[in-house]
Amino acid sequence: MKNTKFTYTKMIFLLGFIFTILVSCERELSDEAVFATFSTNPEVFTDSPVGLGSDFYFPFAGSKATAWTVDETEGYNSNASMRFDIPNADDPEGNYAGAIFRVDGAGRNLTRYDALTFWAKASQGVSIGEMGFGQDFGQNKYQVTRTNINLSTNWVKYVIPLPDPSKLIEERGMFWYSAGTQNTGGFGYTFWIDDLKFEKLGTIAQPMPSISNGEDKVETQFTGNLVSMANYGLTQTFNLESGLNQKITVAPAYFSFKSSDIRVASVSELGIIAFAGTGTSKITATLGGVEATGSLTVNVPGTFPVAPAPTLDESNVISIFSDKYTNVPVNYYNGYWAPYQTTKGEQTNIDGQNVLNYTEFNFVGTQLTTPLDISQMTHFSVDIMMLELPTDIDLLLTFKNENSNATTFQQNRIGQSYQLDPRAPVVFNDTDFKAGVWATIKIPIRPTLETSLDKTGVNLIIIENIKSSNVKTIYLDNMYFYSE
């Protein structure tokens, strides 16, 4: 007993000694250590940009670079405002205006706020396509988008809620916008924004997050493929003080995703889904602890079927998209033409194979950087695959020369003959398609007298879903002109 007591007493002394040392060390650390902190300044623009640094305005590609200025004659109860001059559709310096406002330096801590607010008005009644925050030309990890913001000629306050402020510890993307012309004449207009800042309103309530636009979506994917949850309708809806529900589109990083079988599909912090094995997995999510409506169920049958390799000699080919040939420069494989286009997706890589992958397909366009002279070409070839065939396949493929005095074109039908037009004969029957199998479609380049196509400067290739068929997913590969 004595020995036990002696040992216990020594142990208490030893623990007390260690504790004293630790407390001493902790006190010394707290006195001398400097922890990283970020500005909590909520203001972005009052009479001038606030705390953004010297290099903070970055226009989008194709935007008119001089669209934004500080107007020192117009303001909301102030001496100045941000002025945005949206150009005419034919302005050679850019046919729309869009840019990000990014802090030149360390980001800001926005965790104490619940909304980005501003006052705005326009020279006429207009609807601004997109506004938001979180774009930094990096990962855009916490991007938020509010669409179709209606402005009047009077100053009105607008609110863009923060989906989950706790995420915004070091945010550099203070504001971004994208706006185009609003009328058939393609004429521009002006709008102003003032008192742009983050606020704690305390009236942002009833969060209602959703994925897949609130629907239970089912689709087929393949092992080795990577897709982003950003393509699946990620939104958050809040009830504002006005009583209205405000929906915003939010980046995947705001959500916590869960896969029912991570051996089939796993989701990263940035919302990238990796398909690793065969089977079925259901993906659900929460945002800020609130369960999101909607889900994504993926069926993974195996590896992606490879499109047939072209065999023509490259000297007889002008390639638009193919791993076999050297492709001509392309501005885009999907123009995302608002407001009528629903098609999402563009170039992707599936298990080492580059393909064009489109979902929610109604029409899509590929614009060439330099117009092509296809006068010596006899055909156009494209490989098409649909995983699920609609009952009424009717696609329209169009080559256009928009640089002629009058736009000229050739049209071809793929599938059924919905509205027979001599200028758009059926070149591939719907009965020749098989689900999950590549179909190689050869389209003759017909004489100009039959089609009106000016072959000296083709710059646009469009594929349309004429009958609005239920084409869930369509893949394209090996697009090229060739001569026999």
Image: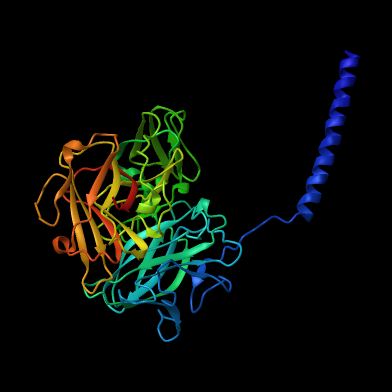
Quarter occupied by the N terminus: top right
Question: Is residue 450 at least partly visible in the picture?
Answer: yes
Asked which quadrant contains residue 306, the reply is: top left
Front residue of 97 and 39: 97
Q: Position of residue 45 (x, y in %)?
A: 49, 73
Vertical position of residue 148 compared to residue 469: above or below: below
Q: Is residue 18 left or right of residue 350?
A: right
- What colour scheme has been applied to the protein in the rendered image? rainbow
Q: Is residue 481 left or right of residue 145?
A: left
Count of marks overlaid on the render = 0
Q: Say if residue 227 shows up in the picture.
A: no
- Relative depth, front residue between 308 and 144: 308
Determine the residue located farthest toward the bottom in the rendered image: 73
Snapshot quadrant of residue 450: bottom left
Closer to us: 262 or 194: 262
Q: In the image, residue 49 lies at what x, y percent? A: 52, 75
Q: Whole-percent x and y of residue 363?
A: 25, 53
Residue closer to the observer: 38 or 238: 38
Image vertical order of residue 298 relative to residue 79, above or below = above
Q: Residue furthest top?
A: 1
